[in-house]
Every structure is written in structure tokens, then in C-alpha cells.
Amino acid sequence: MEQSTLPVAPYRELTLPAVVLGGTIGIILNVALIYSALKLGFAISGSAIAALIGYVALRGRSWRGTIIENNLNQTIASAIITAGSGVVFTLPTLFLLKSSGTVADFSPWPLLAAAIGGALLGVVLIIPLRKKMIEIDRLRFPTGTAVATILRSGSAGVEKVRLLGIGCAIGAGWKLLMISGWLHWPGVIESDELSLNFGLLPAYLSAALYLSPMTFASGLLAGRGGLSFFLGGVAAWWIISPLVVWAGWPTAGLTGSGLADFIYTSSLRPLGIGLLIGSAAMSMLLTMPIILTAFRALSHALPTAAATQHTHPQRTELSAWVLLAGLLGAVVLLFLAAWTTADLPLWRAGLATLVGTLWLGVAGLIVAQSTGMTDISPMSGMTLVSVVLMMALLNGQIVAALAVGIAISVAIGQSADMMQDLKTGFLVGNRPAQQQALEFAVSWIGVVVAFVVIYALWQGGSGGSHGFGPNTPLPAPQASALAGVIEAVQTQQIPLDKFVLGGLAGLLMELTPLGGLGIMVGLAMYLPFSVTLTYGLGCLTQIQLERRQGYAFSENILVPWAAGLIIGEALIGVGEALLRMTIG
Amino acid sequence: MKPYAAPLTCLFGLLFALTAAAKPPLAAGEWPDTLPHALAGCGVAVLGLWFWRRQPHPLWAESSPAEEEEQLLAAGGRLEPCLAALQALQTRLPTLTVTAMAAELEIFYTRHLLPLSQTHKQFMAGVAQEQGLERLALFSQAELWINRARSAAGDQHQAESLQSLEKATASLLELQRLLNGTPP
């Protein structure tokens, strides 16, 4: 039998090329995605593109780079990009409020400190959550799984590469078709949605499919685990919505899509936010002992195992002291930001910091679990609640509330996206401590880049201001919406009744023997039904295929194909963002 | 009482509560006049929930104590062939080319590790939470090292792959010891 030769060089992991490449990709994509978020209103994950570039640049033809090295490159890039996306939905709001005269001039430094604090808190948060969501609950994290498929594509066999390629081509081709507008068909295909009304069903049933291969693929990857999300959407739109109409509760005279919009914005979405908060709070209470025990169990078990087998014990998690230091540092930054941006008593700034940090844990759990199950993050809803909460605690001081809001937004965004990277790391066999240390080290870069770009874009407007916002080429839809919410809070127009009652139902749902029910139903009510339906179609397809073909088919055929769909759509999305940035 | 009565009562109560809560209030900042209905729905849900959680085998729950006992026995049974296959693989791998080694690892992953991974929570069954999580942590650790071995083999790095497999075996042996209740 042929003997192989052992390479003399150590296995490549954290190398200078990986750090430089990850940093460069992270900064470039951060700029592009900030521009895209201000233009289109949503951010796109850059993990897949970082992994693909890494695949070519690090492994290349010489085949020297390794899968773990590429995973670290992608982790660095993603940490930088994600931190920026947390800033872009919040900081521009302050500029818009300043231009409307709602707030006076403000200094960027406390805001920057808060955002860096948020970046650190985000990393602190994901470390205990990783054990629960990746090792215990085994959530799918569709993008994380897709990226792992790219990283391992060179070694996973020809068949898997072929399936990945086919999926990627379909995802990319479909996204291009949607962007081109060729499929636009008034009344049937509009705004990336295929209407299923057929002129027969009432609009308040919201029967439409979101034509996104990525969403369908996320359902394929989730399978049975995503059913509660799908059923939650069905209950919201096919039971609650018709009952609301039947009872005559909507404003008189509303019909068609106006009626559906009313039910969504004034009832289902705020109730969904309440459900998310209530169920996450209960989930936090129920799982805190598990998270703490998991830490203790790991620290006891591994030295024993290593000692028994005389293997080299390697730290797989960051030390608790590093976590504590990160937590304290971040909390101090947050406190200073809240205290220095407004004329507040010390106790009030301290209370806001304490509540903000606790809320961050709850919100982080919500977005991480939602992303783990569905790939969809309810980040804008959580940011909205954060700002409302902070305005209440900080006596209506908008700048101080937004300073803490920026921190929370950055942190919860990271808890979702970094968890995807940690999932990828688990699937390719990377040590989490290595990834977490890198995330600690580089995520602040994304915040600084985001601040510089947003300030530069604002000052690029006529007369050195108004570079983005309504009636400009960069309408900043999310920031405009948040500005609208803040103005509504000032006039007491927040649907607090829905948040409280939804929260109560969420607490109860989380107590049922069905794990994670509240968060999934809450997310289904929070999102447009078209997304839930497409996702549900993916879940049902996976369940049927697995029933007929077995789980090996699901893992070996469906996973690479679905990963390809996700990557294909993501690549075209990033390409579109870059193109828009170039041509303006 | 039928086993589905309690869960359906709970879910119906929640649906009723959410429907009542969906009514927009007359003025912003006020409560809708359906508040008593929403609270009554929550009350019904609490009642259903109480009976649901008291069921010996809660319907639709992830597991029950009796099932956990069975799972615990099954866990030990399933781990043994996986461990034996891993140890056999370990002795065979150094004689193979790295490409063949990568292929063998993929076969081992699909045939032996994946089925265990799909039912990983069985390692937590029937024991106290701390013990269960210790077992799960060991299994996850083994899975991570096997994933690393697969990656390293794909990277043509035989030494790293073999070293990772040693660590995976160590973790699985420790897990087996815990499942069998033998002293260290």
C-alpha cells in the first residue's frame, strides 16, 4: 500500500496572509455594505464572499492554505463587516433628527465609545450562547452551514462540489433575474413576491411567496426544526388576521393591501415583537442554569479526558477572565457614553447601562436563535425596542438613548452573525477560542470604519451635510424609520399594549414542552408572511425528502445544494451593492 | 382525558389571547377594550399548560423521563460501534494516502458520527443536568476534532488529521466511561 509523506510544516491556522486578507476584505465590504444599507435599507452578510475570496487567494493553485486558515480569514472579515452593519441602522438616525431640528449638535466620540463597547459586548454575549445554540441545541445557522460547505468544498468530494455549484448557479441566476426586473408582472410578481391570491383570496390573508432561493434554502436546512415558525405564520395570517377583519377592528374604509398593511403594522408586527421579548426573557431564565452548568461541565470534563489519553489539552474556549474583562470594559464604555452625551444624574446613566446590558442579553438570545433557525435576524425590531427602552430610562434624552441604542444594535448584530461564523468553525473543526479572540481583537475596526464612512457620506451632501436621507440618492430607509419611531415615542404613540400582551403570551409559550415555540411564533408574526411561506415550503420539502430518502441524503445532497442557493444569492447581493457604490 | 386535550387547550388559549390582543386601542397609549378577553385567553393557556406539563409523557415534547431511560441505554449501545470504527480507522489510516484517508473519514462521518450527532441529546438523558452536559460537551468536543481531522485530511496534512483523531478518540473513550459508570 502506498505510504504518504508527512508534511514538515505545522498545520496553517492563524497566519499573516489570513489576517491581512480578512482585514482587507472586511474593510472593503464594510464600506460597500454601509452604502448598500443606506441605499436599499438592508445589510448583506459578507461571510460567504470572504470565504470564496479566501478560497482563491489563500489556497489558490499552490494549495498551501488550509480550511482552518480560510475560516479565520472569513471570521475576521465577518467581524468587521457585522460591527459596521450595527452602526448603519442607528447612527444615521441622529443625523436625520439633527437635520429636522429634533436634536441639537452632538459629538461623535461618546457615540464611537458606545459602539466599540457594543462590539465588545457582542463578543462576550456569543461565548456562552455558543455552547447552548451550537453544541446543545444544534441550531442549523444556514449561512454558517453554507460557508462551511464552501470552505470544505475542495475536500468534500466531486459530487458535493457539483451540487454546490448547481445551487450557486441557480441562486445567482434567480437573483439576477429578479434584479433585472424581467420577471416583473403587475399583480402577480412584484417586489420579489409571487402573489398566490389568483384574484380570489382576500389580500389580508397575505398569500404570497417571497421569491428568494436563500429563504427557501434556509427552510431546507432547518427541516422539522423550522415548522413552528411556519405554523406561527399560518396562525397569524390565516387565523388571527381574518378574525380581526371579521370582528371589524381595522379602520373603516381600508381594503386590499391597505387593510393587510394595517393589520401587519398595527397588530401582528408589534405583537410579534412582544412575543419575541417575552419568550426570550423566559428562555433566558430557563436556560441560564444550562449555560452555566455547560461551562462548568466542560472545564471539568476535558482535562480528565486529556489526562486519560495523554493527549495535549488545548483550550477551546476563551478564559472566563477574558470574558469578565471584556464585559467590564464594555460596560464602562457604555456608561461613559450615556453619561457624557446628556445632562443626566449619575444614577440614571448607571441604571440605563445596567438595564441596557441585561436587555442586550435578551435581545442577543432572540436574534441568535432566530438566525440559528431561519437565517433571519429581527435586528431592526430589537433596535427599536432598545431605543424606546433607553428613551424611557434616560428621560427622553435622544442622543444618550441612541448612544446606548447603537451599542446594543452593534452587539446584537454581532451575536447573530458571529454565531454563524462559530457554527462554520465547529463544522470545519476550528477551536472556538481562536475565533473568539480574533473577534475581540478586530470587531472595533468595523465600528471605526462605519463611523468614518457615515460621516463622510453625510458631509458629501450639498453644503457639507444631508448626504443621505429622504429625497437624496441614499434614502437611508431604516434610519428614517427609526427617526419616525423616535418622534412617535415623543408623542407617546408606541403600541405598548401589543408589546405587553405579546410578551405575556411569549412567556407562556416558552413554558410549553415545545422548545423555542415563542421565539419562532414571534418571528413569524414579526416578518411578512411571504417570507414565512417560502421558508415553510423549504421545511416541508426537506421533511418529505428526508422521510423518503433518509438523513444521509439530506446531509450529502440537500445541504450542499441549499448552501449553493444561499451563496449564489448572497454573491449577487454583494455584487449589486458594490456596483451601486461604484456607479452611485 | 385525551392526551391532546391539555396541549390543545393551552394553544387555543394562546391563540385566543393573541387574537384579542390584536385589536387596536381606541387611542394611542391605551389598552384595547378586549384586554379582559386577552387575559382570559392567557388564563386558559395557563390551565392547559399546567395539565400538559403534568402528563407523564408530555405530548409533542422533545422527550419524557421514560423515553430518556430508553435513550440512555441506546446511547451507550450506539457509541460503542462508533468508537470501535474510529479506533479501527485510526490503526488503518497511517498506511493510506492522504486522499484515501480523507475519503475514509467522510465514510466514517456519514455512517457512524452523523447518526449519533442527530440524536446527541440522548447523552443527556436520565442523568442530572450537570452530568448530562458534561457528556454532551465531550461528544461535541469529539465531533469538533473529527471535523478538524476531515479538514486537515482535505488539506493533505496527515499529521494534523491523525492528531485530531487521537483527541476525538480520547473524548469518546471518556464519554463511554461516563456512560458505563466506570471509575476513571
Image (cartoon, coloured by chain):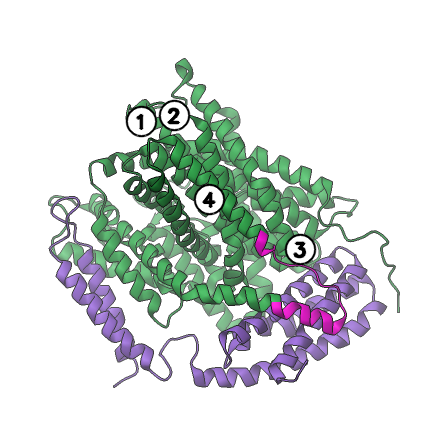
**Residue at horizontal 22%, vertical 47%?**
A495
Say what amino acid the circle numbered 1 marks.
Answer: Val
Callout 3: chain: A
Identify the mark at residue A331; answer none if there is no mark: 4
Q: Of helix, strand and loop, which one carries label 1?
A: loop
Callout 4 crowding tier (Cα within 10 Å): few <14, some 14–19, many ≥20? many
Say what amino acid the circle numbered 2 marks.
Answer: Phe
Q: Of helix, strand and loop, which one carries label 3?
A: loop
Q: Of helix, strand and loop, which one carries label 4?
A: helix
Q: Colour of chain B?
A: purple
Which residue is label 2 attached to? A106
* Between marks 4 and 1 in the image, the one whose residue lies nearer the viewer: 4
Q: Earlier in the sequence, mark 4 or mark 1?
A: 1
Say what amino acid the circle numbered 3 marks.
Answer: Arg
Callout 2 crowding tier (Cα within 10 Å): few <14, some 14–19, many ≥20? some
Q: CA distance from mark 3 to mark 1?
A: 50 Å
